[in-house]
Image: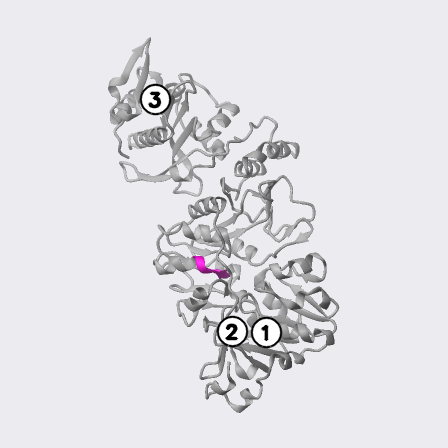
Amino acid sequence: MDIDNLDPHWNEQHRAKICSADEAVRVIRPGHRVFVGSGAAVPSELLRALADYAPELHDVELMHLLTLGLDPTTEERLVDRIRHSNFFIGANARKAVQECRADYTPIFLSEIPALFKSGAVPVDVALVHLSPPDRHGFCSYGVSVDIVKSATEAANLVVAQINPQMPRIHGDGLIHLDEIDRILLLDEALPELPRPEINSVNAAIGRYTASLIEDGSTLQLGIGAIPDAVLANLEDKEDLGVHTEMFSDGLLALIQKGVVNNRRKTLHRKKIVTSFVMGSRSLYDFVDDNPLIEFRPSQYTNDPFLVAQNRKMVAVNSALEVDLTGQVCADSIGHKFYSGIGGQVDFIRGAARSEGGKPVIALPSTACGGKVSRIVTRLSEGAGVVTTRGDVHYVVTEYGIAHLHGKSIRHRALALISIAHPKFREQLLLDAKACGYIENQQLLVTSTAQAYPIDLEERFQTHTGRKLLMRPFKETDEDLLREFFYAHSDQSSYFRFLSTANFPPRQMMQGLAHIDYDSAMAICAVDDSQARERIVGAVRYFRDPRSDKAEFTVLVNERDQGQGIGTALMKKLVRVARERGVHGFTAEMLAENNRMFSLLEDLGVGKTIRFERGVAVVEFALDEVVDQP
C-alpha cells in the first residue's frame, strides 16, 4: 500500500504515525501485555516483526483468541521472550499449550471483554488488522470484531496494520485514526480457511441435526464439517435467521437461495448478527460493505439473555466426548487442552431460554479411526466439563438423536447408548449397570449397525385435520409405549393381543422398542403438538426368516380412531416393507374385530381373509395394497 496513494482525508497527524512493521512493534517493552487480533484478522506482518524483535524483549505476554495461519512468535526459541496466553486454542498454538510453553484461560467468550474493560486483564499494546479509513477517519475491524474491539479500547497503545483487502463491515466495529498510535500500511491477502470435506459420518449428523430445525428458526453454527453438513440439509427450510458467534462459507448458498432471509427473527429482524467470519476470499468479499450482516462484539453476540430473545433459537455446537449422564467435554482430551470453551455455553444457555429454542451438541460417535467411543461411561481422566448435564438438551451422532432434557440418568444413559457406535454399546450398557445408572434387567440396546432411519419420518393430516408425525420407533420410546398400552381398554387389548393383560411386562416393552429396522420394523403416529409426545397409533411387522413374508400388527388409540390413522400407518408400513424385500403380510385377529376388517377393506385386501375357529387369518401380497399415501 503506497503512502503516496493515501486518501486526501488523511491529515498530517495521521500520516506521521505511518511506519514500517519493525518500527511499529518497538512500542512494546519488556513485561508488556500485548493483545493480537483474531482469526483471519491476525496482523501477520506485525507478528513477523515482533518475532524478529523478540530477542531484545523479556516477559512479553501475547493474548489472543484463535488465530489463522503460521505464527512465528510461537517458536520454541522465543519461549523466554514471548509467552502466549490463549482464550481459545488454535492449531498454531496447541503444541505450545500442551508443552506448557503457552497458557490457556478457560472462560465464556461473552465474559472476556469484561476482563479488559475492568482492568482485571491489562492491555498495554493492541496489535490489530484494519480496513482503510473512510472520509471521516474511521477504520473497520473487518472480519473479526469479537473481543478485538474491547481489547483495543482498553489498550494503552494501538498498533494497526491497515490493509485495503480487509473488508469494511457494518454494525459495531469502527475505530478512528486518532485512537491509533502506529500504522503499518500493507496490501496483502487475508488468510483463508479451506472448506472441510464432508464424509458420510458428518453427512448423517447433518441430516439428524437439520431435522430439529423448524421453519423460522434462528441459527448459531460454528466452523467445520458438521456445521457445513447441517447447512447442506436446510435447503427445504423457510425463513431461517442467523445470530451467531461466527460463520463461514457454508452459509452463503442458503443466503443466496433465500432460505436464510432473517424475516422471522425476533431480534435484529432481516439482519445476520455475528462477531467474526473465517473462510474464503469469496466470503470476505460477501461481507464487505454488506448491510445484511452486522458485526458486533462478543459481549453482545454471545450474551445468553440476548441470544434468548431470538424465537426458535437453535444452537449447534461440537464436543470431544459426552458421558452417559450428559456431561460434555469440549476443550480437552484428558489433561491435554485442545481448543476452548468459546461460545458453547453462551449459546447453549441462550437457546435453552429461547421460546421454542433447541440447544444441540453434535459429534461423531467415535475418534481415532473408530477405535475410541466418544460416548463414554465417564469422561477421560483430566477432561473438564464445558456444558453441564443440567444444560444439555440434544446430543446427535451419526446414529441418531438423544433428547436428554428433563430425563432421568437411566433414560439419559439408554438414549446415549442408542446413538453410540454399535461396537461399543454392549460394554457401555454393562458399565452403566455397574455404575448403578441402569437396572440389571435392562435388555441390550440393539447392536445393529443400522442407524435410526430418519428418512422414513413424514407428516400427514388426518380426516379431521390434525397434523401428526409418522416415524419409526426408537429405543427410547419404551415409556411412550407403556403410556400407549395403558391408554387402551381391555377390549382393545383383547383384540390386539388375544388376551387381557392388566399391565405390560417390562421385557415386552423393551422388546417392542428395540428393533433393527429390517427384520422388524415398527412405525408410530405421534402427536407432538405438546411438549411431550403421545403415541396415538402404531404398526409393526416381524419378518419370517424362512420366507419373504412378515407378520403385521396395528393398533390405534380408541379416542383417535375413525380419523384414518390406522390406514395411513398401514400404507406406510407396506411401502417400507416393500423397500426391504418383504412380499407379503400375514396376521391373526378375532372374528369380531370389525374395525380391523374395515381397515383391510380400505387397503383393498378384504378378500384375502379366511376364518378358522373364530379367528380371522389374513394373508395378502403387498402389491395388492392400494399404492398411495
Residue range corresponding to the magenta coloring: 244-250
Q: Is 311 a magenta residue?
A: no
Report the quarter where the C terminus lies.
Answer: top left
Name the colouring of the figure.
Answer: one colour
Q: Marks 1 and 3: which is nearer the front?
A: 1
The residue carrying pointer 2 sits among few (fewer than 14), some (14 to 19) or many (20 or more) residues within 10 Å by Cα, namely some
SS category of the residue bearing label 1: helix
Do callouts 1 and 3 mark residues in contact (Cβ within 8 Å)?
no
Q: Name the residue that disc number 2 marks.
A: 188
Q: Position of residue 446 (x, y in %)?
A: 52, 30
Sequence-earlier tag: 2 or 3: 2
Vertical placement of 335 versus 293: above or below?
above
SS category of the residue bearing label 3: strand
Give the CA distance from mark 2 to mark 3. Answer: 69 Å
Do callouts 1 and 2 mark residues in contact (Cβ within 8 Å)?
yes
Viewer can see residue 165: yes
Vertical placement of 536 versus 50: above or below?
above
Amino acid under label 1?
Glu
Q: Position of residue 485 (x, y in %)?
A: 43, 27
Sequence-earlier tag: 1 or 3: 1
Q: Position of residue 127 (x, y in %)?
A: 60, 74
SS category of the residue bearing label 2: loop
Q: Which mark is residue 45?
A: 1
Give the CA distance from mark 1 to mark 3. Answer: 73 Å
The residue drawn where x is 55% and y is 74% is 129
Amino acid under label 2?
Glu
Q: Which mark is residue 166?
A: none
The front one of 612 and 331 is 331
Residue found at the very far bottom of the displayed protein: 12
Residue 158 in which image quadrant: bottom right
Q: Name the residue that disc number 3 marks.
A: 585
